[in-house]
Image (cartoon, rainbow, N blue to C red):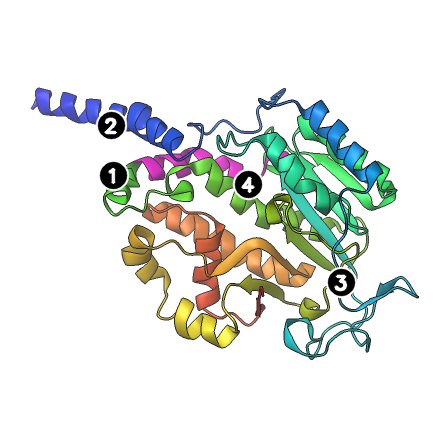
Amino acid sequence: VLASLALCCLAVVLLREVIVPVYSRLIYWSPGIDVLVPGHTPACDVESILAAALAKLRSGQVEFGAETPHWDAKHGHCDCDSTLASSEGNCRWPEGGERMPTATIVHALVDLGRLRRSACDYLNFFLPHLMRNVSMVVYTEAWAMTYVQAVRKHMGLEAKTIVRLLQASSDEEGGIFYQLLPQMQEVGNRNFLKLAYTRSARGGRVVAKYSWVNHLKQELLRRVARENPFGTEFFVWMDAGAGHGHVRVPQNLCVCASAVPGTVTLFHRRSSAEELFEVGLNGLTEQRWKEWDFWNREMEEVMGTFFLGDAAGLELLWKDYYGLVTRLLRDGYSDHDQAMLAILAAEKPSYLRFVSSD
């Protein structure tokens, strides 16, 4: 009996201290849950990246994409009823939407120790988004704050910019989900062998800090919506690495297709909402996800890269999202935001709207 107990203890230690860390490196993640460490500096030259970014901006190497639909250049604001924009497709102004909506974009940038993409890669990815002429709140670590501030200053957008230090010193500053990191990693460790057997041992299921940073989106967007530092009606989450630096973004931002009070708009990969529910999310329930999808399928139907809503809608989403994450953790499951959003979307709550990302 003692020998069996000793072997079991040894197996647990090997799994936690050897197998999972080695596997994490094989899938390009540094092991462990150390994030938001005070004084952390990434393993790349941030000053050189900043100098190169400013040089590109001065020389005009980084250009904006086509202007956003519904932008009224003459009056300098969005007009969702503008005849300049198409009234068809995904850009159409929905019934009940605000005609001249205003929005704040929220970003976050944290060095998670991703081995295939360095923190400086993400600074390069972030550059086009920082050029936008829009009110912006950026949460990041100390090493990236100067970069963000310098780029926004170069663009003449200091008055539309708030940069906040993201740290782990308390619930308010470090976040509610940060407190769940140890439990997320423990759950990932327990599920690792079965996930490996089904070839589903991917990032968010076994690397807790990846799930954490994706759940953090909900927390930070809700926080900004509650504070509303720029007095806008809508709040947009946009991943700092969206487009990986290859997509030219418009200079301005209009959220006409999503500007319905009391709602949150999620973007999906299907051609229509009908196809999303009839094909992509057909039959999905929380129970089925726990029994089958978690072990066999990567849920990418609903995107977490960007989404938006007003303060009332985001409060409703937060309640459901946080409840789902904590409930699944209690039951022994952990995954990133796209899985959570898919499960919630499948329930079709009245406050959620769905738009194709095409």
Residue that appears at 53% across and 32% down = 112
Question: Which residue is denoted by mark 4 in the rendering?
Answer: 176
Give the residues drawn in magenta, as a range. Answer: 173-189
Question: Which residue is denoted by mark 2 in the rendering?
Answer: 12
| Residue 259 against residue 335 in the figure, above or below | below
Tell me the distance, in whole angstroms, between the alpha carbons under discs 2 and 4: 28 Å
Tell me the distance, in whole angstroms, between the alpha carbons under discs 2 and 3: 54 Å
Q: Residues within 10 Å of mark 3 (few under 14, many from 20)?
A: some
Residue that appears at 68% across and 25% down = 46
| Mark 4 residue type | Ile
| Mark 2 vs 4, N-terminal side | 2
Q: Is residue 103 left or right of residue 237?
A: right
Query: Tag 4's secondary structure?
Result: loop
Tell me the distance, in whole angstroms, between the alpha carbons under discs 3 and 4: 35 Å
| Mark 3 residue type | Thr
Do the residues under discs 4 and 1 have CB atoms within 8 angstroms? no
| Mark 2 residue type | Val
Residue 181 counted in the magenta span:
yes
Question: Which residue is denoted by mark 3 in the rendering?
Answer: 68
Residue that appears at 40% across and 71% down = 279
Residue 146: percent from the left, percent from the top?
76, 29
Quadrant of the rendered image containing residue 201: top left
| Mark 1 residue type | Leu
| Mark 4 vs 1, N-terminal side | 4
Residue 127 counted in the magenta span:
no
| Mark 2 vs 1, N-terminal side | 2
| Mark 1 vs 3, N-terminal side | 3
| Residue 135 against residue 284 in the figure, above or below | above
Tell me the distance, in whole angstroms, between the alpha carbons under discs 1 and 3: 47 Å
Query: Tag 1's secondary structure?
Result: helix
| Residue 227 visible in the picture | yes
